[in-house]
Structure formats: C-alpha cells, structure tokens
Image (cartoon, helix red, strand yellow):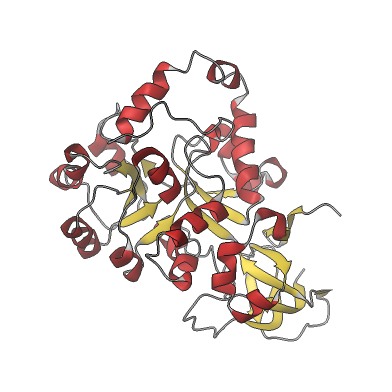
Amino acid sequence: MITALLNALIVLPPDSNAGSSRVTTLRFDSRQIVSIDDLPRRGDRVIDRAGYAVYPGLVNAHDHLEMNHYPRSKFREMYTNAAQWGAEFLTRLDSEPFRTLRTISLREQCYIGGMKNSQSGVTTVAHHNPLHRPLRDRLLRRADFPVRIIQRYGWAHSFTFERRDLRSTFHQTPPGAPWMMHLAEGTDSAAAEELDRLDQLGLLSDHTLLIHGVGLSASDRQRMITVGAGLVWCPSTNFYLLGQTAQVGELAAAHLLAIGSDSRLTADGDLLDELRAAHATGQLTPPQLFRAVTTDAAKLIGMPRAGSLRPGSLPDFWITLLTPTIALDPYRALIDLRAADIESVWIGGRVQSAAST
C-alpha cells in the first residue's frame, strides 16, 4: 500500500535535482519513496501532516553499537594518541563500573546503541566492529532492532589494536562495500605517519573509509581526494580525548566526508550532538553538514538509497514540528534540534518509534 503524507515541508538535499525543500505531498510504500508533488491516488492511505517537517533519516557513519551503555570515560586529562586511551581502557575492564556493565547481554548492549540512534533521527548506521548476531539482516526481523545496520562491509580496528592481517581484511571486503579503519587518531608523529603506512600496504582506495583523521596533513587529505577515499569525522570524541579535531573542509567539498557519533564511551552523545560539535568548529556550512549525515554519508557507507527523500530512495525519515526556523532554513535548523523534538521515526515506510503523548 502507498501512503501519502500531505502538506508537510519535505526536506530535500541541497542542490537536489528534485528541487528545493517545499511543502508538498510525499508518497511512499514499504520499499521506496514513490514520488513527491503527486496528488494522492485512489487506494492511497492519506495522512495530513500540515504544520510538520519531514527530514530524511540520518546516516550515522561510525558507531560501536555495543559500547553505548558505558559512561563517558578517560583516565587522564589529554592524550596525544587514542591508542594510549585504548590501552588504559583495556586495563580497567575488570574494575567498576566496567566489570558490571560487561555482564549485560550483547543483545541488550546492541539494542541500547540502536535506540540511541533511532531516538535522534538516525535510520541507518555503520557499525564498526563484527556484525554481531543481533545486528544481522535487520530487514528480515523488523521488530528486533530499531535502525538499519549496513550488512556489507569490511573493517579493521587500527594499526595498534588490529590482530588480523590488514591486507586480508581489506581484500575480503565484499565488492563495492566500504572498508573501515580508525586512522591518524592522534596529534603525535605516529598518527601523522599512518596514512603513508596504509598507502604503502596498498590499502588506500575509493572503498577505503577512514575514521577520525586528526593527524592527517593537507597533503594526506589531498591524496585521499585523489583516490576517492572517505573520512568519517567524530569531533566530540576527538576534542574529548585529544583536544583537537581533523581539518575536513576539502573532503566535504569533494563529498568524501561523513559524520559519525562514535559511542557514548567517548562522544558527547548522539548524532545530533555530533552535528553541534561539528558546527562549533566553524569548518563547514549547514548544507555541508547536512550532506555529511545524509547523502554523502550514505554513499560512503555503500547505502546510496539512504539519507534522501528523492523518488527511489529508502522510505526512511523522521517528522518534527515545522517551526519558523525550520521553514526559513531546514539545514541550519537541524543543528539546533534535539531528540526530544522528534515526533516520529519511520523506517521501511512505517512508524518505528514515536514520541509519547
């Protein structure tokens, strides 16, 4: 059955070939956005959303879903490399509160991460760790998990903590899928050398998706642009652990930048919080930030139908009250929105979650 949402502001990508955001009709079924601007047809389920705005489901390009039940934690004021933080964290796993929190089932851990994302308007997540059983084939078990999880990807943790052969993880990645790895997550010389190390291993390509990139130089970023490699930016984690973040302007201009929330273990919170942290750096315009959590992010994680309300896209979106600020500039308004502002989240053309009345 096709559903027609009437009279809502439909937020479209900046510079979209579908035109600018506008109050119109959005028609969709369980598989795709069918049309915009078309009047309802006989047999459509019609829902009037006058006074509301419809945003595309946000795309979180980096999360460790099973780690969002931990408190935000660090063990010294500042680090020069995230590997230092990682080593200190591992030594504390058998102390409180981590020892008790580790007893929570993996299913519940992942679900907590999924709910964090769904409540902030995220409908698609790139999970950076093994594809745990609770995260597999979400579309076959709709009620089991609150967001879509990409199923096709390759990954390595980092130069420091990956125990598998890096080349093997890269070459075993499914064709056309992203290969993800933490890289240059530091301000020291070790972080500055990591892109060279990766390139020497032959692992820098148009399917490489690097996470953090604080230590990347201008020439490193240009090398990434030349080959088409992407970067996932997690500024709140970077500032919390390292006191600075990556320079991302050139990558955003090349549509090779996505934003990720990371987990609550080190980040401010959810993807909306991360958008505010990104905006506060002054590096990107609101339309660039919007693309980094919608269309650009979707392309980089191998889900090009996510993050948009154009015909043919996935029918994933969220609805909020249409305020004068949103009507004036929906991209800038997104930066100030909070999870509490979301009226409902739709995935696969049906309500996944809704605010309590």
For residue 194, say whether it is visible.
yes
Residue sitting at x 54%, y 86%: 19
Where is residue 299 drawn, in percent x and y? 42, 62
Number of marks present in the image shown: 0
User: Where, by quadrant of the figure, is residue 1 drawn?
Assistant: bottom right
Whether residue 234 can be seen here: no
- Image check: 315 left or right of 61? right
Residue furthest to the front: 77
Q: Residue at x 31, y 31 (%)?
A: 83
Q: Position of residue 226 (x, y in %)?
A: 20, 64
Q: Position of residue 116 (x, y in %)?
A: 62, 44
Task: Choose top left, top right, bottom left or bottom right for residue 342.
Answer: bottom right
Closest to the observer, 106 or 189: 189
> Does residue 192 sit above or below 324 in this rendering?
above
**Vertical placement of residue 39 versus 181, above or below:** below
Observer-nearest residue: 243 or 121? 243
Q: Residue at x 56, y 55 (%)?
A: 272
Residue 26, position as x, y percentages in the image: 69, 77
